[in-house]
Amino acid sequence: MKILVLGGRGFLGSYVTKALAHHTVITGDMRSGGKKHRQVDITNPNDVRKAVTGVDLVINLVGLSPLKQGPFQQVHVNGVLNILATKKPLIQISALGADSKSEIEYLKTKGVAEELVQNSGIAHAIIRPSVLFGTGAELFSQLDRIPIFPRLPTKVQPVYAGDVAKVIASLVHKPNGIHELAGPTEMTMYEFAAQYRKILPVPFVIFKPFFWIACTLQVARLSKNQYKSLFLNNTAAQHPAMITTYSDWIKKERKKIIER
């Protein structure tokens, strides 16, 4: 089976391509190079049409960071329309909380994309993961740069990218349904940060007004979307295949570092 993994060189993409080792995998993103890689801009219909030539299934991992501002409509919606126009079976990576009526642009455009996929008439599966963790996770790179973290009460169920990749791999022959993937442990965002590294806690009542000002003024590309996201839990019923706990993974990673 020949599979095109859009966003295959990204964080989750590295896990997905590994899980698809028994298939012929072609990766595609904005970067060029590599025999089994195609340079693809999903907002360009011609790029997408050329990229899908000869493939049996498309896995779309392309998505903008919810932590920053960006052209969400162009990438999350127009990009998906270009993929759907090819009529190829699709596994679409969405997000927990995706809702076309959301006030948060990231979740709204993810929700609109889901509706387009569901109404397309093509074979499809939709994956909604909670906060992803693993080697190279975006949140880790953010935490590495800050010495403090607010005691955010928001609940998450961190899910290991390797477990998510295995679920995706299990669906390639028969993509179907919506799959909400959450890890086995529920925790607050502060607990997530504190388990990753030693970090100075900041009371939420102190952090809240400063973050609101930063988002309003769009400091460091922050936006009001990020402020609203502080109050949204990111939890779901645990998927049976989500077996890797965040705390166990962190301990193993620390042990690897010490052994080096």
Image (tube, grey):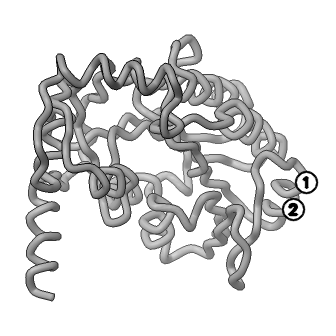
Q: Amino acid at mark 2?
A: Lys
Residue at screen point 33% across, 20% down: 232
Q: Which residue is mark 2?
A: 50
Label 1 crowd bin: few (<14), some (14–19), many (20+), radius 10 Å: few
The C terminus: image quadrant: bottom left
Q: Position of residue 152 (x, y in %)?
A: 20, 27
Q: Position of residue 192 (x, y in %)?
A: 18, 43
Q: Nearer the viewer, residue 108 or 15?
A: 108
Q: Which residue is mark 1?
A: 46
Q: Classify residue 116 by image quadrant.
A: top right
Q: Amino acid at mark 1?
A: Asn
Residue at screen point 57% across, 30% down: 110
In the displayed structure image, the side of residue 135 where residue 98 appears, left or right: right
Q: Nearer the viewer, residue 20 or 129?
A: 129
Residue at screen point 68% across, 48% down: 89
Between the residue at mark 2 and the residue at mark 1, the CA separation in whole angstroms equals: 6 Å
Circle 2/circle 1 CB separation < 8 Å: yes
Q: Classify residue 50 by image quadrant.
A: bottom right
Q: Position of residue 172 (x, y in %)?
A: 54, 56
Tag 1 secondary structure: helix
Name the residue furthest bottom.
260
Q: In the rendered image of this protein, does residue 145 appear above or below residue 182?
A: below
Residue 160 seen in this snapshot:
no
| Mark identifier at residue 216 | none
In the displayed structure image, the side of residue 43 where residue 224 appears, left or right: left
